Image: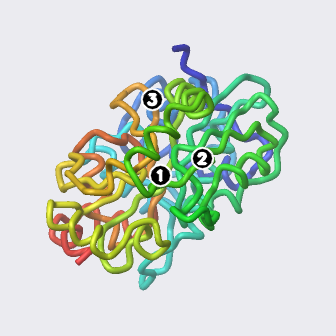
Amino acid sequence: MKKSVPRYPVDNPDRRLDLAARAAWLSYEKQRTQDQIAKEMQVSRQVVQRLMALAHRSGLIEFRLKHALTDCIELAERLREKFDLNYCDVAPNESETIEDLATVGSLGARYLETILPPNEPYTLGVGNGRTMRELSRRLERQDLPKCRCVSLMGNLTRDGKANNHDVVTWMAEALGAECYPRPMPIITNTAEERRVLQAQPGYQSISKLVADAQVLIMGMGFFGAKSSLLEDGFITADETRQAIEVGAVGEFLGFAINKDGEIVPAEYHERLTSYLPEPNPGRPVIIVASGAQRAAAIIAAFSGHLANGLITDENTARILLDDELAQKGNR
């Protein structure tokens, strides 16, 4: 598959300056070459050259890097090295903030605006969840008729009620893109119902689009009394307890995973309609998440090579880098 080169966001000065700071930090602090910076930031070498020039013009570079995001850039680099990530970005937030969905959602929106090409076919696999909803609300209006937004999860409860955190429709509308929802319950009432739904041509077509998508982007869930699957009525308290008993610490596109990123034998899995992507190191699979309660789940996803990118906030980043705090997060 031909890899699409992310586009430089020429109409967003703040985002350009953030990217210039990141490129300058990688060059001067980490001694990266321009080719290495281009690969890490998922842009072309020519874009790196323009970013470096912008950093010089803007006065970011003197004897040391002068930018409010320096700490965040360093945290992103440490996370990238610790978890062997292809991409990582960290947003600043207040020191006492426990969960910062709005800030992380905004940073996720800037990421998508950076990578989506204006005039080329592009397929984006989209997960659900609160953070992803915040991301979709913060996208700048665009006109990308060749872009396709494809849902990775169902958008209904078992009794047919719409999911308040279904994201793909809002995202496609903001981007002016084609929309491919997955019009079925996230978790069906029976395994037979799931089998019938997945046998439909529409399901097969959507799954093919996801398999060919250039980027997958999603939130990250956790298991506990406040988990999204439970609070939103997709699974019951008994199903939650059973998943935890067999080792679940995180929820990845609806699948319960243990601390090693392995899918556990949760009873509801035989009724789950979500798409589970095959591991593919060459394709960006980006988690957009915030909060201490999600730390163990995020680490589990990286341990199991389910994802290779992260967009988060400063406080969550510090927790992820502290093994003891990360394991305490969702207790």
Disc on res. 168: none
According to the picture, the residue beneath numbered tag 2 turns out to be: 111
For this rendering, which residue is in front, 12 or 4? 4
Which SS class for mark 2?
Answer: helix
Question: How far across and down, in percent of the image, does residue 55 sit?
Answer: 61, 45
Would residue 118 be found to the left or right of residue 56 on screen?
right
Identify the residue at image location x=77%, y=28%.
146
In the picture, which quadrant includes the C terminus?
bottom left
Callout 1, which amino acid? Asp
According to the picture, the residue beneath numbered tag 3 turns out to be: 283
**Contact (Cβ within 8 Å) of mark 1 with mark 3:** no
According to the picture, the residue beneath numbered tag 1 turns out to be: 89
The disc, 2 or 1, on the residue closer to the chain's N-terminal end is 1
Callout 3, which amino acid? Arg
**Above or below: residue 103 compared with residue 20:** below
Disc 2 vs disc 3: which is toward the camera? 3
Which SS class for mark 3?
Answer: loop
Would residue 109 be found to the left or right of residue 319 on screen?
right
Question: How far across and down, in percent of the image, does residue 311 sit?
Answer: 47, 54
